[in-house]
Image (cartoon, rainbow, N blue to C red):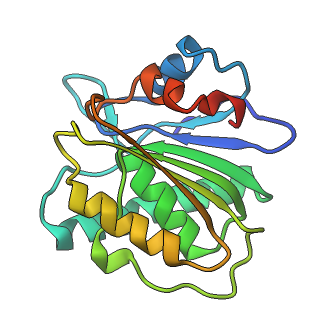
């Protein structure tokens, strides 16, 4: 994984989606007008033909998906702890969003703000957590009804879980026209650039 830059006040960790890369994800943010510094992490696996990265193989099987998320999160968690041991913010798209949400539930890293774009967690990972260390984290869940990969039911299950969690501030943003791929339009929806 490659980490570049750092936000001095509170580091922001960026986790791209399937078939993207740290540099491609960073470019979309910069085109949208983001001017901060952040730690853009590259996925664990690289496609030998497209040269794009992913965090784990694509799977519609919940058992396999759960296992893939847990293994990828182990690696990302270790990397973040080494680089940024204090309070952080994190933004993830698709697979990166799944890892970000799992990181929050593990409660080993202090997370103040989390942005999940086109992400969810399988039911098997939506388990209660207690003794939360982060100071009332803000969780922003973003989804589009035009998403061709993430089902509305999976997203709604994730929303219900985080809305019911104590000491977590959850906001939900649903679009009707954006497809699954990350683009600057996601950031323009609610002017997220003001907060990241």
Residue at image position (21%, 36%) is: 146
Taking the spot 27% from the left edge, 35% from the top edge, the residue there is 180
The residue drawn where x is 39% and y is 77% is: 126
Picture quarter containing residue 139? bottom right
Q: Position of residue 41 (x, y in %)?
A: 53, 39
Looking at the picture, does residue 48 appear above or below residue 158? above
The residue nearer to you, when weighing 104 against 73, is 104
Q: Quadrant of residue 169?
A: bottom right
Outermost residue toward the right in this view: 9
Vertical comparison of 80 with 36: above or below: below
55 in relation to 181, above or below? below
Total label count?
0
- 137 relative position to 23: left or right: right
For this orientation, the residue located farthest to the top is: 31
Where residue 1 appears, as percent x and y from the top left, is: 51, 40
Q: Position of residue 143 (x, y in %)?
A: 36, 45
Residue 17 occupies quadrant: top left
**Residue at the outermost left position:** 61
Question: Vertical placement of 20 versus 54: above or below?
Answer: above
Horizontal relation, residue 111 to residue 15: left or right: right
* Quadrant (top left, top right, bottom left, bottom right) of the C terminus: top right
Q: Percent position (x, y) of residue 69?
A: 35, 63
Residue at horizontal 48 percent and vertical 44 percent from the top: 92
> Viewer-proximal residue, 85 or 12?
12
Q: Is residue 123 left or right of residue 148?
A: right
């Amino acid at each position: 994984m490659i980490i570049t830059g750092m936000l001095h006040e509170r580091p922001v960790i960026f986790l791209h989606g399937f078939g993207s890369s740290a540099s491609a994800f960073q470019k979309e943010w910069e085109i949208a007008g983001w001017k901060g510094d952040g730690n853009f992490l590259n996925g664990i696996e690289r496609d030998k033909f497209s040269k794009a990265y992913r965090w784990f193989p694509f799977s519609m099987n919940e058992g396999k998906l759960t296992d893939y998320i847990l293994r990828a999160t182990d690696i990302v968690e270790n990397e973040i702890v080494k680089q940024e041991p204090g309070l952080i913010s994190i933004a993830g798209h698709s697979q990166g969003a799944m890892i970000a949400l799992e990181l929050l539930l593990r409660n080993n890293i202090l997370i103040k703000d989390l942005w999940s774009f086109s992400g969810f967690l399988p039911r098997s990972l939506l388990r209660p957590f207690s003794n939360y260390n982060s100071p009332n984290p803000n969780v922003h869940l973003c989804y589009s009804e035009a998403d061709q990969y993430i089902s509305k039911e999976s997203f709604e299950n994730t929303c219900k879980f985080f809305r019911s969690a104590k000491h977590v501030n959850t906001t939900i943003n649903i679009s009707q026209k954006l497809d699954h791929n990350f683009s600057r339009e996601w950031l323009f929806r609610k002017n997220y650039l003001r907060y990241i």
